[in-house]
Image (cartoon, helix red, strand yellow):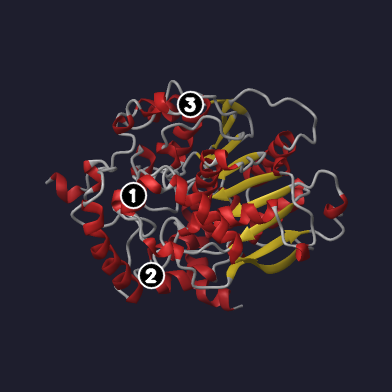
Amino acid sequence: MTDFLKYSPLLISTTIKHYLNGPPRPSWNLKCHIFWAKYISLLKSSETIEQKQRASFSFRPAPVQDGVMINEFKIDNKYRNEAQVHLNIILKPFEHVLDPEWKNLKDDGIISEWVQFPNDEWEKKEIKKTILYLHGGAYYSFCKENHRCITSSLAKIANARVLVINYRLAPQNQFPAALQDALAAYLYLLNPPKDAGFEPLNPKNIVICGDSAGGGLSLALGLAIRDVCDAGLPSCAGIIGLSPWVDLTISTASILDDECADYIRNMKRGTANYAESQASKEYKEKDVALAAKIKNGPKIWHDSFERPDGRLHLYVINEGLAIPYVSPMLAESLGDLPPLLLTAGGDDRFRDEAIYLAHRSSEPTKYKGPSYNAGKFEKSPFKTPTNTTLEIYEEMPHVFQFMEHAFTTKSYERIAEFINRVINTLNEPLPPSTYNYINVKGELSPLKELHKNVLNWEKIGIVPTIPHEMN
């Protein structure tokens, strides 16, 4: 009732627009249109970071599946400590651009939950299908509760249990805090405590999945697991990115496309937009302290990252934008990863990122990333193509799985098929990598020519010039 009163003027105006002028895209019903309008109103607010975070925590985009069971618990900090040991190794080249505070744990564990359905008999099964889900929210907002409409749907259609965590949010906890928490959750699944209620999981029963920033974090986690392979950390069965945010340099054309019908605004000025507050004051003070350390270390960033208007994002300082575990699309190589399923909407701001990452992973010798990484792929030990499935859904916005649309159902069906293939419950070989376009009739076809433009984009990984710099 409170939610209805809060949004009632918006609901009335959107309903009138829907029937008078039509929805933003022809296939959208009224529920889709209302979700789109509510999300825009949430993102438009000129509030402090803390206010934006609080507002995001109470946002409920769609209903949760009937009959779902939610079991909340905490993952002990010993798993974070173990994750830190691994991350210290792979993050060593980037230490001078990182806020060291990620190593100082301020709580007693990661707030988590199991999403499942009664009588699933998961514990008794030989193949325990498990999804580790990482929520979206630009790394500074939202939580596991917002995403129960997605996680409960995944648990139901995939007949799996879903582990969801509230990873630490920026700017209070900047990169790599979220990655540390994600890796800790994976380690928890591989070696749970005695009172967890399940035995250590076979990593080939685990699929990592996330949306938006959580999709980027899922791919970053996949890269981290791959890159610490010398430590004996086994890879998962597959990774799913729903509209994954994998390029924090915002370098692709769809990010700036004014014609797309997404609820995410044109991102030419990044995501660090807010009214000043204690949180913004504290991270800016940290940036000043970090500046001297950065100057004394090697330059690992492109000149375009140095912007007169300050940070692009709350998650990481600009000098760290091209770190592969921040922007997986820009990694030296995307080969030798577990099978990938990447979905995005045709009107998705992050569409081009998904397309480019899909091609870089499945054809690593052909698509080698940003110009400033020239020659690095040749030195990488990870050159084997990654089995990748890309699906672009016509007329759909960012993370359209939040919407009550026929494509949401279809995408869940495709996700369930992917999970069954990679966990090998179907006992079938993986099909070759594919890039699919799915029209409003549900028909699959190759990508359209306009979707291939990003493959020839010469400014991959280069932060675009902001308007006042062009005058």
Residue highlighted by disc 1: 320
Residue 32, x across and y down, in percent: 56, 54
Residue 373, x across and y down, in percent: 33, 32
Q: What amino acid type should be assigned to the residue bearing mark 2?
A: Ile
The one nearer the camera, 159 or 452, is 159
- Cα separation, mark 2 vs mark 3, equals 39 Å
Is residue 116 positioned above or below 215 on the image?
A: below
Task: Residue at 63% x, 40% y: name it.
Answer: 235
Q: Secondary structure at mark 1?
A: helix
Residue highlighted by disc 3: 448
| Earlier-in-chain disc, 1 versus 3 | 1
Q: Residues within 10 Å of mark 2 (few under 14, many from 20)?
A: many
Residue 190, x across and y down, in percent: 69, 51
Task: Residue at 57% x, 64% y: name it.
Answer: 166
Residue highlighted by disc 2: 49
Residue 419, x across and y down, in percent: 71, 40
Task: Specify whether 128 is left or right of 174.
Answer: right
Q: What amino acid type should be assigned to the residue bearing mark 1?
A: Gly
Task: Residue at 63% x, 59% y: name it.
Answer: 164
| Earlier-in-chain disc, 2 versus 1 | 2
- Cα separation, mark 2 vs mark 1, equals 21 Å
Does the rendering let one see residue 214?
yes
Q: Quadrant of the N terminus?
A: bottom right
Is residue 130 positioned above or below 283 on the image?
A: above
Q: Secondary structure at mark 3?
A: loop
The one nearer the camera, 367 or 450, is 367
Task: Residue at 44% x, 29% y: name it.
Answer: 380
Does the rendering let one see residue 64?
no
Q: What amino acid type should be assigned to the residue bearing mark 3?
A: Lys
